[in-house]
Amino acid sequence: MSINLWKYRFPFLAVVLLAIVAGCRSKDSAAPATATASHKTPRPGQNDPAEEYCLLQTELKLAKEKKTYLVIDIPNREILLKLGGVVVWNDPIIIDSVGESDSLSKFADKFTDGNKVFIRPVIDKHLYAASDKSSDSVLKIVSEVVRAKIDLMQRVVPERFEILWGNDLLFDIRTEVPGKPRSKFKNTVVELQHALQRPFGEAHVVLRMNADQAITLYRVAERGLPTLIYPGP
Amino acid sequence: MKKIILFVILPLVVIITGGIIYLLSSAPGDMGNSDAPAFADSVTVELPKDAKAAKKALATARAALARLQQRKPYLVIDTHANKIFLRTEDSVLIEATCSTGSGGEYIDSTTGKKWIFDTPRGIFKISTKIPHPWWRKPDWAFLEEGETIPKNEGERLDPNMMGDYAMGFGDGYFVHGTIYERLLGINVTHGCVRVGSDDLEKIYNKTPIGTALYIF
């Protein structure tokens, strides 16, 4: 008995589409929404006093904890690291030519979820490629002199890495330093994930950054790092 | 043909679907796939409804945040990139390469005492400034070398190790010079912050006692 496979194309596509939608929904629902303004939420840029108050109180709380937190300053197009409310590191946001020019405003909209959420923790990061800052042979000699382990002294200089905040929010950061892929397989899986998620609203900002600055940002961006956004107009 | 659908096509559809679900639902990064830590006490605030009270609350919050800002230049030590900065909120006045703690540890096999060679992170103040500092070698410095701890205090003193200047920021930690300038940029210290002599002189001269120091 012969069966025409073409006849089954719609059920097959339906199963695949359902799977994609289910996958996306499960991820969205896990997205952390932390600092929320309990007021009617205006669009970014209206300088709503309630929105500003919520933002100020959120930052004050972070500053009092005396731990490092990240700030994405949209109006000034800058990324900052702050400690106790004081800037300890900053770098301009430079959108890479491979990225979409309006990706930052899309990111801000998605991050704030209509100016309701100003803070999200870093949930993950992925290092695509990197080089070692010091050669292992140099560090081997140094480690014998100072009696410290090589892996504690080594620093990776990222060629490309990404920081994820959940809710399909990510910064894809690229530097001028050529590096070796950490895992070609993992890189392919991650790229495939993004390719699948992009049509469902992934906010993907591709940034260009100086390698020295990228070392700091890559190392600081640990899971749970609070990230505050100053939404722009 | 039914068998082909049952045993080949259907399993393939299940595998592909499962793969897509996995790819879409798992976080793509390097930190595994556990839930992100939520902030235990989220900030949920509401501006007072009364216009006057709202204005006052807003002004108070703005002032509280402004009070945290540094009016004078402050020092920042980036232990990740091994950099030291004298900076303001808006600009970097001096940037130099330094060396910070290795994060290694030493355990004295006789007493079991343990030292962790980390540079402390947080907010500090420059509390002392010492020109031509002498290093008073702590116990670990002798134990690491396999030497016995001297009873004579004078045998602990080393006039060269700390370079030309030292700035203390509490608990025996200093920003100081080094005789190992070639190791600057690498995490090799026992917790202090080493800076090259030229940069140290510039920083020392522009850093009065009481200058805020941020280490991250």
Image: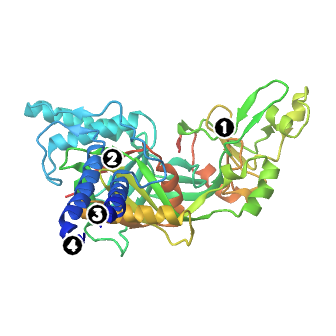
Q: Which residue is mark 1?
A: B173
Residue located 30% across and 67% down the image: B1
Chain bearing tag 4 is A
First reached walking from the N terminus: tag 4 or tag 2: 4
Q: Residue at x 66, y 37 (%)?
A: B173
**Residue to which mark 3 is pinned:** B2
Q: Secondary structure at mark 2?
A: strand
Q: Position of residue B99 (x, y in %)?
A: 67, 51
Q: CA distance from mark 3 to mark 4?
A: 14 Å
- List the single residue furthest toward the bottom: A97
Residue depth check, mark 1 versus mark 4: number of the one nearer the observer: 4
Q: CA distance from mark 1 to mark 4?
A: 75 Å
Q: Are marks 3 and 4 on the same chain?
A: no
Residue type highlighted by circle 4: Trp
Give the label, 3 or 1, closer to the camera.
3
Residue under disc 1 on the same chain as residue under disc 4? no
Q: Say which of B89 and A121 sits in front.
A: A121
Q: Which residue is mark 4?
A: A6
Give the residue number, with chain letter if any, for mark 2: A228
Left or right: where B64 falls relative to B83: left
